[in-house]
Image: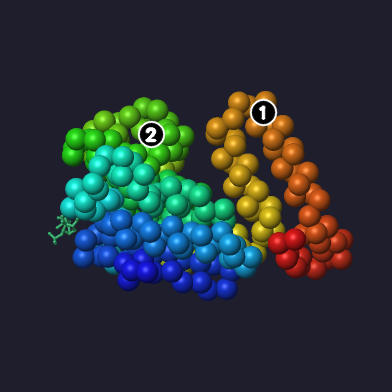
Amino acid sequence: MTDHILFTVDGAVATITLNRPDKLNAATPEMAKAIVAAVEECNDSDTIRCVIVTGAGPKAFCAGSDISELDSYATPWDFRNRSDYCDAIHHLLKPTIAAVNGYALGGGLETALSCDIRIASSNAKFAAPEIKLGWIGGGGMAAMLAHSIGMSNAALMIMSGDMIDAARALQMGLVSEVHEPEALMDRARQLAATIASRAPIAAETAKINLRAAVSMPLDKAMEYERDLQAICFATEDAKEGRAAFAEKRAPVFRRR
Ligand code: COA
């Protein structure tokens, strides 16, 4: 494990922090491997219910892949098959919040896009700057950005490489909320605690369902939702939810 990734668990909420603030949390291959390991731990856990992803320091969430390390791959095929931090975050099975506390550039933007919910500090800046360097993003940039903000806005960001600020990101729907920098993590933890208090299988299923909603034809997505609903309906937690409602008490969900 590298010190450049911090992984903490507080009750039902895990936090993955990119911790290389002097390099704007630019991700090295070592950091990517540590993120893959942290994601595996979250996915294997029966008690972690929500994951926050953020960056250390006041300036950056993540300025993308460490450009100086991109020449360290022996072949383009090794580069293609690298441990990818954005992919790893995308494969988290638990609900995920990106607390974007500054620059989210390139792979940093893809990391934020790989989270289910994005909230940002007022000093956050977003860009897909790869085009300025001679390539394009490879961690799902086009698909996730187009789904998030529409084709024209996605093309504008990807083809210009220019940064947008937090206010513009909010207007485009790239983020759901903007907060003062000092309030961002409190809000992320509050939101994570709310999500963690909900029925966990239903929350994880909602994530699967949302992904299906943007990748399946409408009629298939609607059928699939009905199947997922039936799976949730059959859980002990759903029974508990109905019992708690009838008994006018708070439900106790056990992820069963
Ligand atoms: N890879 C490696 N190092 C990076 C980095 C990256 N993606 N982004 C920032 N850094 C490093 C800088 O080289 C600098 O290191 P140094 O102090 O040893 O010189 C440090 O982080 C601070 O960055 P700096 O450029 O001095 O800060 P700034 O406020 O002047 O500019 C940015 C900030 C984000 C505009 C600028 O750092 C930048 O353009 N970074 C590259 C972003 C990018 O293209 N990401 C996509 C990569 S695929």
The quarter of the image holding the N terminus is: bottom left
In the rendered structure, the answer to whether residue 7 lies left or right of residue 235 reads left
Reading the image, the residue beneath label 2 is: 142
Determine if residue 171 is in view: no
Residue drawn at (51%, 66%) of the image: 14
For the residue pair 7 and 119, the one nearer the viewer reads as 7
Residue drawn at (32%, 71%) of the image: 3
- The amino acid type of the residue labelled 1 equals Lys
Q: Does the Cβ of the disc 1 residue fall within 8 Å of ligand 1?
A: no
**Quarter location, residue 197:** bottom right
- The amino acid type of the residue labelled 2 equals Ala
**Quarter location, residue 179:** bottom left
Mark 2 residue element: helix
Q: Position of residue 65 (x, y in %)?
A: 27, 51
Residue 82's place in the image compared with 141, above or below, is below
Reading the image, the residue beneath label 1 is: 220
Mark 1 residue element: helix
The quarter of the image holding the C terminus is: bottom right
Ligand 1 quarter of the rendering: bottom left
Which comes before the other along the chain, label 1 or label 2?
Answer: 2
Residue drawn at (58%, 69%) of the image: 12
Q: Where is residue 245 in the image (x, y as percent from the top left)?
A: 82, 60
Determine if residue 157 is in view: yes
